[in-house]
Amino acid sequence: MAIGDSVFCAECGYELTGLNHAGQCPECGAAFDVGSGIGVSSGVSRRNERGDLLMKRIRTIVLALITLGIVGLTAVIAWANQSSKPIIWGALFVGLGLLATITSLVYHRSED
């Protein structure tokens, strides 16, 4: 008996369509049983996980771009005012931006 609807391995996400209702995933070897729901998942949760991962990557990239923008803006303001005071404030904000970017990257990597 073959699986009719799209069903995925809960461990690795391999599509189990066309396989028997119970057995082992050909990709990772995890046991599954469509009848009881053990070891299977719908594709919806996998798609949500991919969307979450994409949003985490976008967050990290946006934080890095904002930090680079602060560096550029600080340089322009310091040059226009011929003063080093904007550099001090810019360094503070760049430090905070780098901290936020690195924190985002670390959390992003730890959840993969």
Image: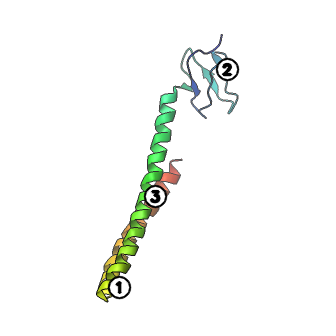
The quarter of the image holding the N terminus is top right
Q: Which mark is residue 23?
A: 2
Q: CA distance from mark 3 to mark 1?
A: 27 Å
Q: Nearer the viewer, mark 3 or mark 2?
A: 3
Q: Nearer the viewer, mark 3 or mark 1?
A: 1
Single out the residue that lies furthest toward the top. Answer: 1
Q: Secondary structure at mark 1?
A: helix
Q: Residue at x 42, y 69 (%)?
A: 68
Q: CA distance from mark 2 to mark 1?
A: 69 Å
Give the class, few, some or many, for how many residues have Cα within 10 Å of label 1's Cα (few <14, many ≥20).
few
Q: CA distance from mark 3 to mark 2?
A: 42 Å
Q: Earlier in the sequence, mark 3 or mark 2?
A: 2
Q: Earlier in the sequence, mark 3 or mark 1?
A: 3
The amino acid on which the numbered mark 3 sits, given as a three-letter code, is Ile
Mark 1 — residue? 79
Reply above or below: 33 against 89. above
Q: Which mark is residue 111?
A: none
The amino acid on which the numbered mark 2 sits, given as a three-letter code, is Gly
Q: List x then y, in percent, for residue 35.
A: 56, 14
Mark 3 — residue? 61
The amino acid on which the numbered mark 1 sits, given as a three-letter code, is Trp
Q: Residue at x 58, y 27 (%)?
A: 8
